[in-house]
Amino acid sequence: MQFFGLKTCGTCRKAQKALIAAGHTLTVTDVRADGVQAADLERFYAAFGDDLVNTRSTTWRGLDADARARPPLELLAEHPTLMKRPVIIDGDKMHLGWSKSVQNAVLGE
C-alpha cells in the first residue's frame, strides 16, 4: 500500500498508525521531504480533480489571488503541501483523505 502524506500532519499520523495496526505494509512518501512525481500528481488529479487541492491549508491561505488562479497541477508541483492528504493507493484503488468512508474502505470496518 502506498501512502502519500506529511510526517507533521496529525491526520496522516493517525491514518498510518491505523493502517499499520490493521496489518498493512506501507510505502510512505512525505510530500514535503520526498516530493511527488509529476506522473503521480497527474494520476491523483485525474482521480480526484479539484478536491486534490487543499484550499483550507495554511499554504493556500498564504498564496495571492494570481497564484491561486494558476492551474492546479502547476500549483501542486510547486507547493506539494497544498495536496489534500493522505493519498492512499491500495492496489488499483485510490483514496483521498481519512474520512469514515476511506477508513471503512481500507480498514474493512
Image: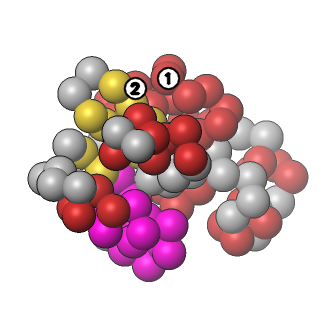
Q: Name, please, the residue furthest toward the front.
A: 109
Residue 18 percent location from the top left of the image: 33, 62
Of residues 47 and 100, the one drawn nearer to the viewer in this rendering: 100
Please identify the quadrant where the N terminus is shown: top left
Q: Please tell me whether mark 2 sits on a helix, a strand or a loop.
A: helix
Residue 83 percent location from the top left of the image: 54, 51
Residue 15 percent location from the top left of the image: 40, 61
Q: Look at the image and give the residue range highlighted in magenta.
A: 4-17
Magenta-colored stretch includes residue 12: yes
Is residue 90 in view from this perspective? Answer: yes
Of residues 12 and 21, the one drawn nearer to the viewer in this rendering: 21
Q: Name, please, the residue furthest toward the bottom.
A: 8
Question: Quadrant of residue 41 in the image?
Answer: top left
Amino acid type assigned to the residue bearing label 1 in the image = Ala
- Left of 66 or right of it: where is 13? left
Q: Look at the picture and state if 33 lies above or below 100.
A: below
Residue that numbered label 2 is attached to: 43
> Which residue is at a point 69% across and 64% down the rendered structure image?
57
Residue 11 percent location from the top left of the image: 50, 67
Q: Residue 88 carries which label?
A: none
Q: Residue 47 carries which label?
A: 1
Amino acid type assigned to the residue bearing label 2 in the image = Arg
